[in-house]
Amino acid sequence: MQALKTGKSRHFGGVSALLRRLESSVERLLAGKNASLPENELKTKLVGDTFNYFLSKVVPGLMGFLSVATFVRMVGYEKYGRYAVAFATVTAFSAGVAGWLSQSILRFHSRHHGTAEAESFNRAADAGLLLSAVLGGIALGLALWLSRTHSAAILAVSVGLYVAMLVYTFEMTRLQAVLDSRGVVRMETIRAIGAFAIPLVLIFAISRRHYSLLLLGILGGYLIPLVGRAFHGSGRRAILIFRRPLLNERERGYLRNLWSYGWPVALWLFSQQSLVVSDRYFIQRFWGYSAAGVYASMYDVIVRSFSLLFVPITLAVHSVLMHHWNTGSRNLTRRILSQAIKLESLLFLPVAAALFIGASWASRIVLGRGNPEAASIVLPLAIGGFLWQLALLAHKPLEILCQTKRMLSGGLAALAVNVAGNYFLVPRFGYRASAYLSVASSLVYLMMLFVLTPGESFQKAIVSGETRESAILPIEEVSV
């Protein structure tokens, strides 16, 4: 037994050493020979977190690919199209409602972590989660009921899935805020495996191939990691908000400040997810649910699995940037952002070449048979997904400066282009128009960022440390 333990220790020690050497190599490529010691330490943390976030996306990426390919074959294009429209609606709603709180926590958590105000800040965040779950769940239920397109069972499952997504996003945000990238890996891995396995078990156990079972199974996938978090310290603390839901004056001040920063971000996230809803809604309206199912399956594999390469960089950059900006280390901000953009661009080039060559093969793998029209949208979907990932980095200066309303303006402009384009072009060109509109809307957003980002103000904030601090002060300090 002791020998076995020793062997395992050597094995894992070798793996750890290999990972450390890999991170050190990437760090040296990013830092260069003339980088200072603090800069190297920061980049080591950035590369390490990027690697961990990459691991957190490996299993979801693989499970996402398997889920689409399996579910399409099991329920068919038409039912998968109905599932895709319902799931996109719930996702857009949950992203919009959860966005104000999650992005505010990421922006300001490190300012209060470990201080006397930490408990008040955490209680304000927990109260925000409770309000979002209750009010958002009621609003979503009413919206689905008024649409008259979903049964009572679909409505109940959709509301439950919304609440689970909301709480899951909140817990993931807490982990990112404390730079616990390994915790993100654990939660994402459990969720991804559950969201793939549980729908299969339900379909085989009940012997029905209805899209409601896909939604119910995905709900189970979100609940499994949340059960584990319920017994964790932060999870227990969040549950305790039910015992004393009323906030004192300082806590209400923090909640108002979180809302003040976060509501434009929430609407921005809602506008981004509404791009997906817009595509699928107009395709099913003009061409039917089968066409929507084909487009959604290709989109889910190309764009969502495509994020496997780029989301880890975005997550690591966001957490590290906000942490060091809040704690006074601001001089590396521009360099980190530019290097992250260069890294994403270098990663995209070979991927784009491979997708250009293997578009027909990719559509055949996803759909189970050849489809020339589906193959024609592979590359534009990939380009659109890449440009949106670049946009997530390009708008970081606006996030840091708390100018989230400018982000919202750009997001709404991109959504307007997408909706108008789908309305006029999908009836004539089919879902191929939606694929190219994903590229057009991302370019519109990037151009809006170029116009709306105040470069001089950002540089001044880096040099002098002047930011809109009043946006994050407790309410009694703001009123002075």
Image (spheres, rainbow, N blue to C red):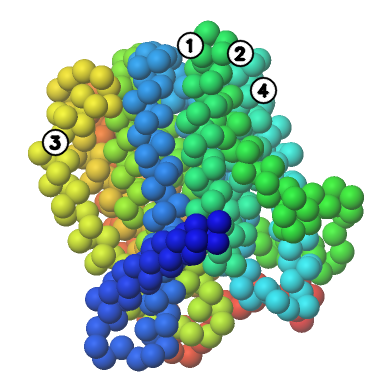
Q: Residue 358 — which label?
A: 3
Total marks shown come to: 4
Quadrant of the frame with the C terminus: bottom right
Labelled pair 4, 2 in contact (Cβ < 8 Å)? no
**Structural distance between the alpha carbons of marks 4 and 3:** 41 Å
N-terminal of the pair, mark 3 or mark 2, is: 2
Labelled pair 2, 1 in contact (Cβ < 8 Å)? no
N-terminal of the pair, mark 4 or mark 2, is: 2
**Structural distance between the alpha carbons of marks 4 and 2:** 9 Å
| Label 3 element class | loop
Badge 2 density bin: few <14, some 14–19, many ≥20, Cα 10 Å:
few
**Structural distance between the alpha carbons of marks 3 and 2:** 40 Å
N-terminal of the pair, mark 2 or mark 1, is: 2
Depth check: give the residue in front, 459 or 176.
176
Which residue is under mark 1? 209
Q: Residue 156 — which label?
A: 4
Q: Residue 151 — which label?
A: 2
Labelled pair 4, 3 in contact (Cβ < 8 Å)? no
| Label 4 element class | helix
